[in-house]
Amino acid sequence: MEIKFWNKEVETATRDRIKQIQLERLKNIIAAALKTPFYSKRLPAVGIKSPDDVKSLDDLRRIPFTMKDDLRQSYPKGLLAVDTSEVVRIHTSSGTTGIPTVIYLTAKDLDNATDLVARSITCTGADKTDVLQNMMSYGLFTGGLCMHYGAERVGMMVIPAASGNTKRQVQLMKDFKTTVLHVTPSYLLHIHSKLAEFGIARSDLALRKAFIGAEPHSENTRKKLEELYGIDAYNSYGLSEMNGPGIAFECQYKCDLHFWEDSYIVEIINPKTGELVKDGEQGEVVLTNLIRTAMPLMRYRTRDLAYLHTEPCKCGRTHRRMSRILGRSDDMLIINGVNVFPSQIEEVIMKIPEVGTNYLILVEKHGALDRLVVKVELYPKMFLGEAKQIEALKSKIGDDLKASITIKPAIELHEQGSLPISEGKAVRVVDTREKL
Amino acid sequence: MAKQLHIFVENRPGRLEVITENLQKAGIDIKAFAIQDRTDYGLMKLIVDKPQEAYLSLADLGCACALKDVLAVSVPDKPGNLHKLLSALSKSNINIIDAHGFVLQPSQMGICVLEIENYAQSNADEVVAKAGFEVLNDSQLYNL
């Protein structure tokens, strides 16, 4: 196997060299952070008043964790380190209480992020001769646009198909001889179940690879996709707070994901104590972005659970590998690639007077895709005796939830007293999908 | 005006029984009933001898229920009579949301219970009477 590199010098640098790059870049990030309202209070409180106060990478651990809630409370500009005239792009993700989180990128930041996506793509063995069909949502979500930019930098022909419209996706694959897909694993499974219906055979398609991500999936799911399509599927990792895709990616050996450690410092902590776990132990992924100056983010708690491999990889890259995401240390649900917090759902349904206080969120598999069902109780005193009212209420709940969490769940109305009560430790979320 | 009791029930075993058990305890006599299937839930519709008491006893239980005005018409049990009634209503552009009917033995008298769209604003009673049918008042309906 010919191993391809985008930036061989960095990708195969010695561990000492990587640490040296990390320290240099950390100092830059500290300098930027000191310009933000948020970190200009937080850093001096732990004795960091200038980049020179950081002597070694160990000094990073003096800095308290940054939480998602800090991002929300700093919305919209509390973490902005540059004048907005320097910003060329923003992305946002939905927030748990209606307040989104935002990231800002300067032209240089975007260039850095794009370069890492190009590195990630190349790492899988794909190159400019490939045709990439990008099935992630474009817009405020990072998955679509950021992958697009990286693929263009590699020189691939990019089909910005975005998500949805399965029939058109398959037609595009066929007509333009798509060789690489960027897609959620559940959607890729779903597409396969539709091929026969569209009268398209596997032999009509030129597919070779798929970059799968945006939702946790098991090794069995990967194997199934590879067998169904006869392709290589590569796991990818990213989150909008860190610039989106291109943080960690699998190489041609598909033995878990190389973390681009020249650009991100990864720590794995015990989510309960905040202490670093031993090498190879599972814990929460904590990230420091070393390549973004418009909006520095240090020791960000991702809530994703994973472990790091310590042994080297056959591909020759020295950047450590992270396991697939094994779960979450919070209650966030990932539904067809969309992040949803139960609290977002609760907030919406509790505003509707016809709905009682008890509810249940059910996540299940419906074919290959995830299905979200929100079960609520009808508040008896608001009942007018008409089916029309019930149907209108179900539509309203569905529409209001779509506006908040971007996906439309199935709504079930129940009698009062038939769902778990709101007091105590009621089980509010039932997830019957396969455990990883 | 005649009232029908509408009850929201989940579509799963035992839910109707809870309602009939409660009505039995409250000494309510059920004259007629219908269930409108809405897949995951249903609306149970009851004609009872004491609608207000039935309503309160179910509301105490936490049931979602409501009393709705209905048009109860006495229709002699002969071929063509239902058609005659419905023709009269449709000619007057009166829309029926839902309906159920039953025949009383041994009097051979049919009863149609109709839910009429915008009933309070409509002249449905008049139209039915003009067509030669008897509109039952509330006590007539409850004491069948």
Image: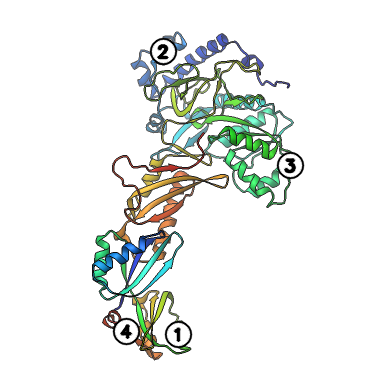
Q: Which residue is mark 1?
A: B82
Could you tell me which secondary element the residue under label 1 belongs to? helix
Could you tell me which secondary element the residue under label 2 belongs to? loop
Q: Nearer the viewer, mark 4 or mark 3?
A: 4
Q: Position of residue A100 (x, y in %)?
A: 43, 37
Q: Are marks 4 and 3 in contact (CB under 8 Å)?
A: no
Which chain does the residue under circle 3 lie in?
A
Q: Amino acid at mark 4?
A: Leu
Left/right placement of residue B144 relative to residue A111 reads left
Q: CA distance from mark 2 to mark 4?
A: 89 Å
* Label disc, if present, on residue A205 of the rendered structure: 3
Q: Position of residue A428 (x, y in %)?
A: 38, 43
Q: Amino acid at mark 3?
A: Leu
Q: CA distance from mark 1 to mark 4?
A: 16 Å
Residue at 46%, 82% in the rendered image? B90
Q: Which residue is mark 4?
A: B136
Could you say which quadrant of the image residue B69 lies in? bottom left
**Vertical placement of B53 versus A306: above or below?**
below
